[in-house]
């Protein structure tokens, strides 16, 4: 099928590359001409596994970029709107870009096209897009508006797109439903997975994706409610971790026990310094504001946010407890991205913790496998340094803080790490390490929701 994608940000770009991979002909349009020129040369502005490979496979063939709306729309049967919806001052999503796209689109709708909202948008946006199209001269028989939210995670977005748990399609039009069914057939009928050159599935248990058809409003709510629920799960795990600390229980054991209930599932129950990123904080605020505007006081979401933010303060308290005075302490920091596997630092709790520690007079030496260039733009301080390896960061450090769950940190020889440090103190804000292993490597180890441990050599022999 012929597809146009308006917006070459994170969502638009991944969707464009994946739809081309599924066999469709895609033109991805953006009014940032410089960005489009770079994309036309295969330069990708984001760090995303498999994206480069997909661009290499399809650029100039099934996947093209353009800064002209006309060029993108002309051949398209389906037009995705994937422009940014940043938070406005009151927490609501700023939908001015979506409105501008709808205005610009209207004169091009000279025959039937399906307009699909892909950006994360609040309920009623579909209705608004429809109104704007009509006001700007589009004829009602020449379009339908559907909602098809994405559930991609940064870092695994390509695999998430090609092997989704579900595809949500909100529409009241049979014609629109048929078009989107056809578009996603390679994923719902398993064709894609059978291909020899398919991007590998994250695990082998994947079954064909299920399409869930709903009204436009329900689809819009599914996106916000999903993110709000996942954030709630994380805050719940963090709150339970705090109770574990009070009573001396182990949150990993507790989460193992509750996550084994298939009604709960073990995913998104990892406690730490809290969630961040460009989605959860923004979507929670937008959902909260929308609910209030519609007459429902969704106070649960305030508490989810409060618990999340308190995790950072609690973590800094742990650092203070381990080091006593913070002023002039040299702290190694592993991880700046809002989660492992990405260079994104938007709303990163790691960056927020660093900023607080700098304000307290600490000297920080940070290492992150991908996010350092971006972090260097915001953590501008005379006491902030960046190292070119995890080992260089810990040299002569008074303590090591783990702030992002990068898998590659777990592959390091922690005895060697301890030997580089002034004091072998490890404060793990992501529960990335096993307490016993950290202790055997010679660390004083503090984590989230688990008891602190001493270095193995310091422990008194157990009475037999
Ligand atoms: C999230 C959702 O998971 C996607 O389904 C959704 O499409 C996306 O937002 C979006 O709306 O665009 P993402 O922001 O990429 O994806 O990141 P997640 O993997 O969900 O992680 C979010 C934050 O929660 C990270 O800071 C992560 O470290 C934290 N987290 C996650 C925890 O603290 N504990 C967990 O158990 C899981």
Image (spheres, rainbow, N blue to C red):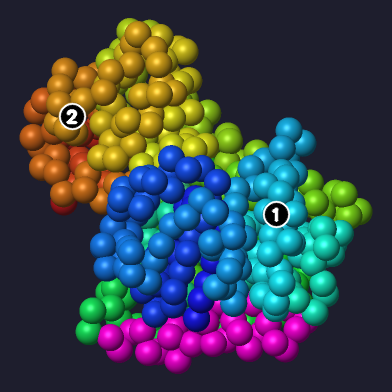
Q: Which residue is mark 2?
A: 388
Q: Percent position (x, y) of residue 30?
A: 53, 50
Q: Nearer the viewer, residue 401 or 244?
A: 401
- Residue drawn at x 24%, y 19% is 398
In the rendered view, does 96 fall on the left or right side of 245? Answer: right
Q: Nearer the viewer, residue 111 or 284?
A: 111
Q: Position of residue 402 (x, y in %)?
A: 32, 36
Q: Which residue is mark 1?
A: 104
Q: Are marks 2 and 1 in contact (CB under 8 Å)?
A: no
Question: Where are the magenta residues, as a range?
Answer: 166-195
Q: Quadrant of residue 419?
A: top left
The main secondary structure of the magenta stretch is helix
Q: Is residue 388 above or below residue 434?
A: above
Q: Secondary structure at mark 1?
A: helix
Please say if 347 is above or below 450: above
* Label 2 – label 1 distance at C-alpha: 46 Å
Q: Nearer the viewer, residue 260 or 243?
A: 260
Q: Residue at x 67, y 75 (%)?
A: 113
Q: Is residue 401 visible?
A: no
**SS class of the residue under badge 2?**
loop
């Amino acid at each position: 099928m012929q597809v146009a994608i308006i917006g070459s940000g994170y969502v638009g770009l991944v969707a464009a590359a994946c739809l081309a991979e599924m066999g469709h002909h895609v033109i991805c349009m953006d009014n940032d001409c410089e960005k489009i020129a770079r994309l036309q040369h295969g330069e990708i502005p984001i760090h995303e596994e498999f994206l480069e490979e997909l661009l290499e496979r399809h650029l100039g063939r099934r996947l093209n970029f353009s800064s002209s709306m006309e060029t993108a729309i002309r051949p398209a049967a389906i037009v995705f709107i994937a422009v940014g919806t940043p938070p406005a001052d009151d927490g609501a999503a700023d939908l001015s870009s979506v409105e501008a796209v709808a205005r610009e689109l209207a004169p091009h709708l000279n025959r039937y096209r399906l307009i699909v909202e892909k950006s994360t948008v609040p309920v009623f946006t579909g209705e608004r897009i429809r109104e704007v199209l009509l006001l700007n001269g589009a004829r009602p028989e020449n379009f339908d508006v559907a909602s098809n939210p994405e559930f991609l995670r940064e870092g695994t977005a390509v695999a998430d797109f090609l092997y989704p748990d579900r595809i949500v399609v909100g529409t009241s039009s049979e014609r629109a439903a048929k078009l989107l069914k056809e578009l996603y057939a390679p994923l719902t009928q398993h064709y894609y997975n059978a291909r020899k050159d398919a991007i590998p599935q994250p695990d082998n248990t994947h079954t064909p994706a299920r399409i869930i058809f709903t009204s436009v409003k329900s689809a819009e709510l599914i996106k916000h409610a999903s993110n709000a629920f996942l954030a709630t799960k994380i805050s719940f795990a963090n709150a339970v971790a705090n109770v574990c600390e009070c009573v001396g229980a182990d949150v990993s054991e507790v989460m193992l026990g509750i996550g084994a209930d298939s009604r709960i599932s073990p995913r998104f129950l990892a406690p730490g310094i809290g969630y961040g990123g460009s989605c959860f904080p923004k979507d929670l605020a937008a959902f909260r504001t929308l609910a209030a505007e519609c007459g429902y006081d969704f106070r649960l979401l305030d508490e989810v946010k409060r618990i999340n933010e308190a995790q950072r303060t609690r973590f800094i308290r742990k650092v203070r407890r381990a080091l006593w005075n913070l002023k002039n302490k040299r702290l190694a920091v592993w991880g700046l991205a809002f989660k492992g596997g990405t260079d994104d630092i938007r709303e990163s709790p790691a960056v927020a913790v660093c900023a607080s520690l700098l304000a307290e007079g600490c000297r920080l030496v940070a290492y992150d496998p991908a996010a350092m260039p971006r972090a260097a733009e915001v953590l501008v301080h005379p006491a902030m340094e960046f190292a070119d390896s995890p080992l260089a960061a810990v040299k002569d450090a008074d303590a090591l803080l783990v702030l992002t769950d990068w898998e590659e940190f777990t592959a390091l020889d922690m005895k060697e790490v301890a030997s580089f440090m002034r004091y072998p103190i490890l404060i793990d804000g992501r529960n990335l390490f096993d307490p016993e292993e950290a202790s055997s490597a010679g660390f004083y180890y503090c984590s989230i929701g688990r008891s602190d441990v001493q270095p193995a050599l310091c422990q008194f022999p157990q009475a037999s």
